[in-house]
Image (cartoon, rainbow, N blue to C red):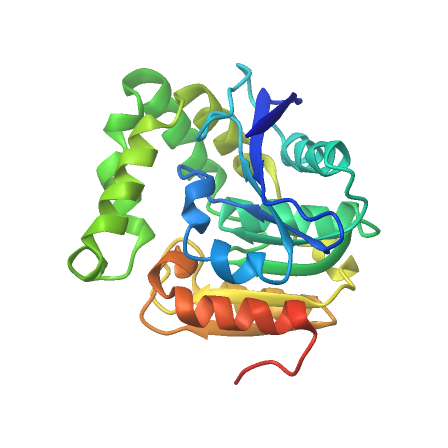
Amino acid sequence: MTGLAGRTGTIRWSDTGGDHRPTVILIHSLGTDRTLWAHQMAALSEIRRVLTIDLPGHGESSARPGLYTIEDLGMDILDVARECGVAQFDVCGISMGGFISLWLACHAPDAVSTLIAGNTATRLGSAELWSERIGTVETHGMKAIREAVVGRFFAPGFEDRSSGDFEAINRVFAATDPIGYVGCCAALRDADLTEDVTRIDCPTLIIAGEHDVAAPPEQSHHLNDQISDSRVVVVPGTGHLSNLEAPTLFNREVLAILDGGPPPI
């Protein structure tokens, strides 16, 4: 585990090493941490050097007090890449991580080789939703929103099908620093990439969850319409964390685009 002083706090990450390989950067969702990618690490490490980053206040990264912008979060990712000696990389993100990945492909196009945007959209939620959540967390802490937010992560029945993963996400969410969580909520509240994403020209895979209520599949189809070299996959039976709920299918699709071969159907 290594770290650097970023715009939003001390950002920490894990690195599988292997400088001779292309690099993929994995960016987790709001309220989780880099362990969200546990089911992807073995498969991706076969073909890539893998950097998994903890966003501010999440996992082992500390959080600077204040409200962040999506540019702050994106620039932190670029700083990590630079610290690791990586000038160009593939990027894969889920939810807020997918949103940051979109920002990177828009605003640092020379750095992004391939984009995988999972369970995200050009705008996530509404300003009213994020402002209300910020107020609740500032007043009552993470425990006040945990049940409602984690409940929206998954498709019906996931807790029964995979109780270990469900409980792990609950623990990680409860341990998230409210300062970092609020700062990230502000970044999502104030960001809109609707006009920006039309500039993305790298190969792009958009992954949606069939039952995702936070970033419904129709938003993924709209995103697909805006990006010239993209395709969309809707993962059956999943909610907002498709990489955790259906790792085999998720991995197959991601490996296909990273290998440069014909996409699975």
Q: Is residue 119 visible?
A: no
Q: Residue at x 80, y 52 (%)?
A: 109
- x and y percentages locating residue 172 in the rendered image: 33, 35
What is the tally of numbered marks visible in this picture? Answer: 0
In the image, is 258 to the left or to the right of 176? right
Q: Nearer the viewer, residue 114 or 35?
A: 35
- x and y percentages locating residue 73 in the rendered image: 63, 33
- x and y percentages locating residue 140 in the rendered image: 27, 19
Q: Is residue 39 visible?
A: yes
Q: Where is 52 relative to 176, above or below?
A: below
Q: Where is 57 relative to 33, above or below?
A: above
Q: Residue at x 32, y 25 (%)?
A: 136
Q: Residue at x 51, y 25 (%)?
A: 61
In the image, is 19 to the left or to the right of 125? right
Q: Nearer the viewer, residue 205 or 20?
A: 20
- x and y percentages locating residue 48 in the rendered image: 64, 57
Q: Where is 54 relative to 236, above or below?
A: above
Q: Residue furthest right?
A: 110
Q: Quadrant of the N terminus?
A: top right
Q: Residue furthest top?
A: 65
Q: Nearer the viewer, residue 33 or 153?
A: 33
